[in-house]
Amino acid sequence: MQFPGRRKKVIGSSQNDLYDHCLQFYGQPPLENISLTEFETFAVERLKLLKSVENIGVSYVKNSEQYVKKLDAEFSSLNFPLRTELGDRRVQGGTSEYEKRRKDHISHFILRLAYCQTEDLRRWFIQQEMDLFRYRFGELTSKHKTDFLHKNNLKYETVSAEEKKSLKDKLITSSYGLSGITVEEYDFYKVPFQDALDLVRTRKVYLLAGNAYIPHHEIVTIVLNDFRTRLSKALAMTARSLPAVQSDERLQPLLSHLSHAYVGQDYSIQKNMGKISLEQIDALSGKSFPLCMRHLHKALRENHHLRHGGRMQYGLFLKGIGLTLDQALQFWRSEFVKGKVDADKFDKAYAYSVRHMFGKEGKRTDYTPYSCMKVILSNPPSQGDYHGCPFRHSDPELLKQKLQNYKVSPSGINQILELVKGMHYQLACQKYFELTHNVEDAGFSLNHPNQYFTESQKLLGGGLEIKKEVDMSQRSQENPANMTRPSQANSKQAHEEMGDLDSFFQDE
Amino acid sequence: MMPTSDYDPACLPDLLPLYYRRLFPFSQYYRWLSYGGVSKNYFQNREFSFTLKDDIYVRYQSFTTQNELEKEMQKMVPYKIDIGAVYSHRPSQHNAVKSGTFQALEKELVFDIDMTDYDDVRRCCSAADICSKCWTLMTIAIRILDRALREDFGFHHLLWVYSGRRGVHCWVCDDAARKLSVAARSAVAEYLSLIKGGEETVRKVVLSDPIHPFINHSLSVVERYFCQYAIVEQDILGSKESVDKVLALLPEDILSFPVVLSQYHIKKGGQYFDKEIMLQYCYPRLDVNVSKGVNHLLKSPFSIHPKTGRISVPIDLKELNTFDPFEVPTISLICEELERPRADEAEDDDVKDKENEQEAGERHYKRTSLAKYVKVFDRFLEAMARSRKGEMLQKSDLQKDF
């Protein structure tokens, strides 16, 4: 695999051919010279794009109207190709479509270098690139979709009219939303079932003699499979050539930062340390805690005890909102002592684990508060546990009762339950935020309990000074004035961004 | 009915050596697993695992020739034999291979239907027991899966095998099937799964519009057998307890219970509760994990089941309705038959048999009840051979090779 370097040949004048479609499979690596600055800028901007894809995908149903709108906005502000025509129209002082496509191309390959090294990184990268691809493919017109398929050698056979007629009833009953008319009018593709596994697995397609009969609008699933396979193979190959890249001292630090930065905002830096008093916690739990933490706090107060899973989830959250180690020790001890644990036992058994959470014991890792993903996906609660995500782990009936106790309106409760049914747990929590704070739109995409707290405090006017964290998904609008001297402005921005990325870099 | 009370597990140490010396159909077995010799080293790179006396389990057994397979099996006398994947290298040498390069490459697509998975819906038996009343479930499973694998997925070479105690296995041997990835196998298994949920779930089948053609096909099989199986044989309406179980699957707003479900085709506002009930009682229950793994080891056809003594025989689908697991020969039976000449040996077979005996050394399964099952296996192998020949002709036509 070739990667951007200093001694490569320059492409001839066939520039327009190279980027004649706004979407690509990234089959061929770029073969041109590129400045180090551009290298950094492109990489960082694509990373921000992928992070947005991740966040927006968690907060909104994928490919819904809002999702598309939000991503469109990201695309514009980060200068990635949106339009399908390559006309050489330049927005006055702005980047041409051609330049955007070139950036898309190059930045993808740079990030491959950073994200090929471990299973986790690869998985994350592939997931975001796939979501990104799905969104972009979905935005294409029918003609452009077909163009894309042909250009990329996906020669799937279309089903003949007679065959469609003879199979009409079967085709209608095997895919959702098809009628006799759509079957007649629209193209169906005959694809070997091995290329349509997602549709086969969920039985959303008609199968005959080993072929899946895919309606035109579903072809994206097939294309995505192909994309994933190619990218997966490519990343494996990239990993093998990596040592050569890493030996280049100019590139190594950047690549290293890039691959750590995906972890994102993790609230392990307590910028609000010591700003909360223990007396405030009860009140705060009702006003600004997400449901999971409110639930844990209540259980702790009632039972004077929490099991390990609960102590970790809640304890780290408290650390994230600003409790110091001493405060934490006092908090847990005073509660446990009211129960069956005497002060001595607390000091012997439980204090150690509190100190551990703050990185003062054992391998001295400063643990980071759990993100929503972690709470939802790992360590499900069992009998006697109160941790986890109530939207995910509670029986809907119990959840309903709890929300009623917390005076959430019946219609609000229904909306929440609908989201839970659709497995959109974080959206459900966001809705809970909106209902308890009396706002239409939360204004953020929830992915962390501490984020819930911070946003809530912001809304309620604090009492705590919350330093505004740099939000990676927020960028200033495209300003023509800034673009007249791209290399200078970019280099300054790139350095700023590198600084921000530094602060996100945390060891687990 | 064949005397099975003759089988005593304590006799295995005596019977097995005889079985492997004179009865096990080695040449067909080798022919099967070589798949026409199209791929180099296909047989040599196949993993077998043996369970020896005293439960000693050995993996990564592999053999270079049919002769070596025979000799080793006769020497080790395995109580159980499993077949695994075809690897990148000879399994017996896997330790000598650089770590990470020894990989499972191909294997038949397999399915394992086990009667214990139906315990929540059968009243006649539970756990490892089976009887003629619940065996119908296997018949239904085979019909449904066989049709789907052939018609929907386009597979042609399916070997259905009785496991020896309480279930059946399916080996899909097509080229394309053997090359399937883990993801593809898992997708096929999910496509074929309709029963979701464990202990906690009462209503295990949920149907909604539109009903996929596959489900409709499966329903028509179930409906054919339902009345006889569920109402008569399983008697699901015969006691309050079992009626309650059925009632638990109905939507809450049904007030009165129709007497014979299969006669009612009620579609209530999109709910297909009658179909769901039939499927819950009868539809095949697959273990997806068995089918998913390329390196998964599965009991070999023609191996013995140590607890019952029965041989894992191929099932002739043309005679499926009359297949009786209790008629399947046990090792003690066929060893006994070996000693005495069969009274009903056909005359015209005599000459051929004597010739074959001389040719094949001392292979005498033809004189025993095992013979008809080996014939089923032969037909299966013939079909694959014909198919391979057809493909090669096609290929050489395309290349204009004459």
Image (cartoon, coloured by chain):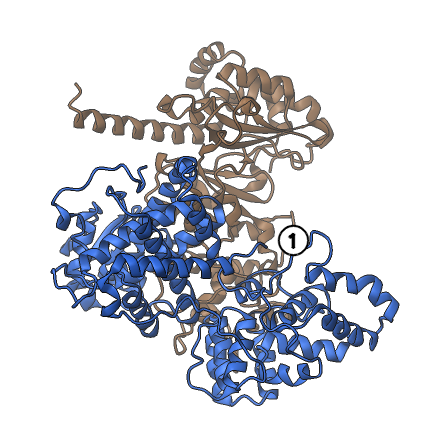
Chain colours: A blue, B brown
The picture quadrant where one finds residue B106 is top left
Q: Secondary structure at mark 1?
A: loop
Report the front residue among B301 and A200: A200
Please state the horizontal and vertical placement of residue B266, each as a whole percent of the image. 41, 74
In percent of the image, x 70 and y 77: which residue is there? A299
Is A18 displayed left or right of A74 in the figure?
left
In percent of the image, x 52 and y 72: which residue is there? A451
Q: Is residue B53 above or below residue B165?
A: above
Report the front residue among A294 and B42: A294
Question: Chain under label 1?
Answer: B
Q: Does residue A274 appear in the picture of this structure?
A: yes
Residue density around tag 1, few if under 14, some if 14–19, many if 20 or more, within 10 Å: some
In percent of the image, x 44 and y 26: which residue is there? B33
Q: Is residue A362 above or below residue A273?
A: above
Amino acid type shown at disc 1: Ser
Q: Quadrant of the N terminus of chain B?
A: top right
Count the labels in the image. 1
In percent of the image, x 83 and y 78: which residue is there? A338
Is A499 displayed left or right of A279 in the figure?
left
Q: Quadrant of the C terminus of chain B?
A: top left
Please state the horizontal and vertical placement of residue A503, each as a whole percent of the image. 51, 60
Report the front residue among B11 and A339: A339
Residue pointed to by mark 1:
B126
Please state the horizontal and vertical placement of residue A198, each as a whole percent of the image. 37, 54
Report the front residue among A239 and A144: A239
Considering every residue shown, the one lying at the far top of the view is B358
Is A178 displayed left or right of B93 in the figure?
left
Q: Does residue B341 appear in the picture of this structure?
A: no
Please state the horizontal and vertical placement of residue B56, each as a whole percent of the image. 69, 29
